[in-house]
Amino acid sequence: MTQRLPIPPTRNALLQLENQLEFLTTGHDLLERKRELLTRMVREQLGTYRKLREEAAQLVDSAYYWLSITHMRMGERMLHLAGLGLEPSVEVKILPRSNLGVEYPAVRAGKRPLQPVSLMWTDASFDRMRIYLTDMAVVLAQLGEAEIALRRMLNEQRKTQKRVNALKYNIIPRYEASIHFIQETLEEEERDSLFQVKLLQEQDHVI
């Protein structure tokens, strides 16, 4: 049996409960709509995340393959010297973003032109390695955004689902049960009053 609210059965209380129930029902409908939109967003974001993760895995393999080739051809010391003084090949900007109340960082990663290396002993594989490492960094930045966004969307979806369930299975039924109880109580009081009036009228006729 649904537990009622501890409210006296008066007409004023009944009116307040009916207004509050209407507000709660509207809130439930809005939260249900938000939950549906979040579910759709999570599904779309999950597809983006999986695609970026697959792309990132391929680029990581290619980048480390060319890194090993370059390391083998140039040696660790020459590779270190060639990398000294080089400017970053990736430009990253992080901006705040919000969607349906879900806040997450929007990562904007772009490739910069490769800086030429003047050392005579560099191998052609060095530039190939830099290209793959740059591409890898860009996709990993995008993957980071997708993963954070997906995690926060899922958290918000779970919170919204809990609120929807609380309203649907706990709060709204308590208000409905309380309204039903007050209506029955008031109707019973009205019947008793009518019965008393009828008795008085019958007594007046007898007198």
Image (tube, grey):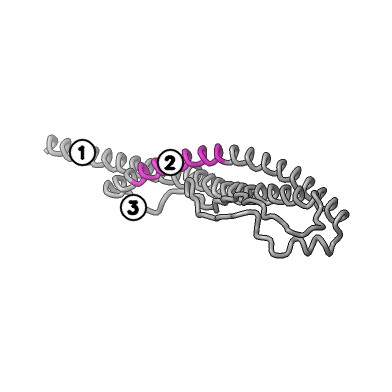
Q: Is residue 1 visible?
A: no
Instruction: For residue 42, say whether it is visible.
Output: yes
SS at mark 2 in the image: helix
Residue 101 in picture, x, y percent from top left: 47, 49
Q: In the drawing, what numbered circle is on residue 30? A: 2
Q: Secondary structure at mark 1?
A: helix
Three-letter code for the amino acid on which mark 1 is drawn: Leu
Q: Which residue is mark 3?
A: 8
Q: Left or right? Give the position of 6 relative to 70.
A: left
Q: CA distance from mark 3 to mark 1?
A: 28 Å
Is the C-beta separation of discs 3 and 2 under 8 Å?
no
Q: Is residue 23 magenta?
A: yes
Give the vertical position of 143 relative to 29 (above or below): below
- Nearer to the camera, 116 or 42: 116
Mark 1 and mark 2: span between their CA atoms?
52 Å
Range of magenta residues: 20-41
Q: Considering depth in this image, is 87 or 48 the residue closer to the camera?
A: 87
Q: Residue at (56%, 39%) from the top-left corner?
A: 39
In the image, which is nearer the foreground, mark 3 or mark 1? Answer: 3
- SS type, badge 3: loop
Q: CA distance from mark 3 to mark 2?
A: 30 Å
Q: Position of residue 94 (x, y in %)?
A: 55, 55
Amino acid found under the numbered disc labelled 2: Leu
Q: Nearer the viewer, mark 3 or mark 2?
A: 2
Q: Which residue is mark 1?
A: 199
Magenta residues, dominant SS class: helix
72 relative position to 155: left or right: right
* Structural crowding at the residue carrying mark 1, measured as other residues with C-alpha within 10 Å and reported as few (<14), some (14–19) or many (≥20): few
